[in-house]
Amino acid sequence: MFCPVCGKPVREGAVFCGNCGARLAQAAKPAQPAPVQPAAPKPAPAAPKPRKKAAKGYGVPVALCSVVLLMFAAAFVLFIKPGFLMSTDDSSSKSDSSDVSEADASEEDVSSAAVTAATVTRTKPEVTTAPEVTGESDTVTEPEKTAPEETTAATTRSKEQEKVYKEAMKFSTEERPDFGEFEWCFGQYGLMYEPPSGAEKITDKLGYSGGWKAMIVYDPNNLEGSYCRELDNISIEVEGKKVRLTIDWYRMELEGELYDEQDMGDTLFTGQTTNEGITVSGAAEISINNLWKSGGKEYAVGAMITSEGLPAYVAMIR
């Protein structure tokens, strides 16, 4: 016997399908076996009457069985079937919870990835900002930049030029000057503009290199009616035909009064070498045209014109 709804096999006499719970119509009124009659040649016509009596005789058991079957069906629907539905719901809820857990896991993966990315982003700046702890790195880097230039300049010099440069460095000085060191430039006929007789001229431009003590006399011909002079330190750097001259201001004498100028910033002049010496410009125009050696010292004289057009005399010694 098979269920007309789901097609699954069911037991004989079942009222409901054990698989889908469908009511079996053909079992609503089960057939009862007819009682056996003793001996009658043709019992067919009399068969209906005993069947009616048997139905009356078995009315109570049949009703009782029907009730029991209904109770069984109700129990099946209320307990067995809901359990099946609950298991189905549980499986679906499990699948949903697994989906949720997978979503949570994916979210955790995304969040962990975000945390990792944030960590990398944080780490990255820490790695890039570590060298900037102090400004000392800048101080270290600057000599590294200038060192190759000095090396290149040194390697391009010939042995003779290198010898001249080293000789100039022996005379180079950073000591502060004194007015008494410049008595030599005041001659019988005024300020000295030419080297004395017998002096050895410095003709190689690298021989100008290094530090000098300097005196600048403003308006040496007294055209403005005021006498002013000052003491400074001058540094000269020669590279090929290029020249850099730096003045480190020190002390000024104006109308017999001394004024300290050490708080003034250094002044840079740039220019080139000439046949006689060097010429540079900046806040003023300076030319040094005569340089010589005498008595174990080096001397130089030249001229300057300020930005206001005032002439000045320049003397150097070291």
Image (cartoon, grey):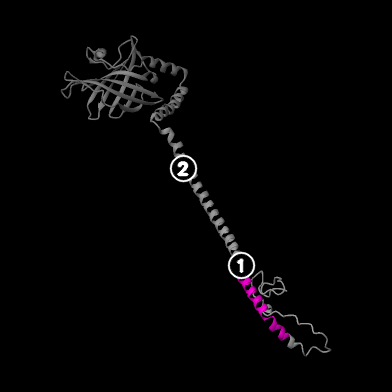
Q: Which residue is mark 1?
A: 81
Q: Is residue 168 magenta?
A: no
Q: Nearer the viewer, residue 135 or 76?
A: 76
The spot of residue 54 in percent (x, y) is 72, 83
Residue drawn at x 54%, y 54% is 101
Q: Are marks 2 and 1 in contact (CB under 8 Å)?
A: no
Please tell me whether mark 2 sits on a helix, a strand or a loop: helix
Q: CA distance from mark 2 to mark 1?
A: 58 Å
Q: Which residues are magenta?
A: 51-74
N-term-proximal mark, 2 vs 1: 1
The spot of residue 116 in percent (x, y) is 50, 44
Quarter location, residue 242: top left
Can you see residue 287? yes
Q: Is residue 60 magenta?
A: yes
The spot of residue 306 in percent (x, y) is 24, 27
Q: Amino acid at mark 1?
A: Lys
Q: Is residue 299 above or below residue 7?
A: above
Q: Which residue is mark 2?
A: 121
Please tell me whether mark 1 sits on a helix, a strand or a loop: helix
Residue drawn at x 24%, y 15% is 179
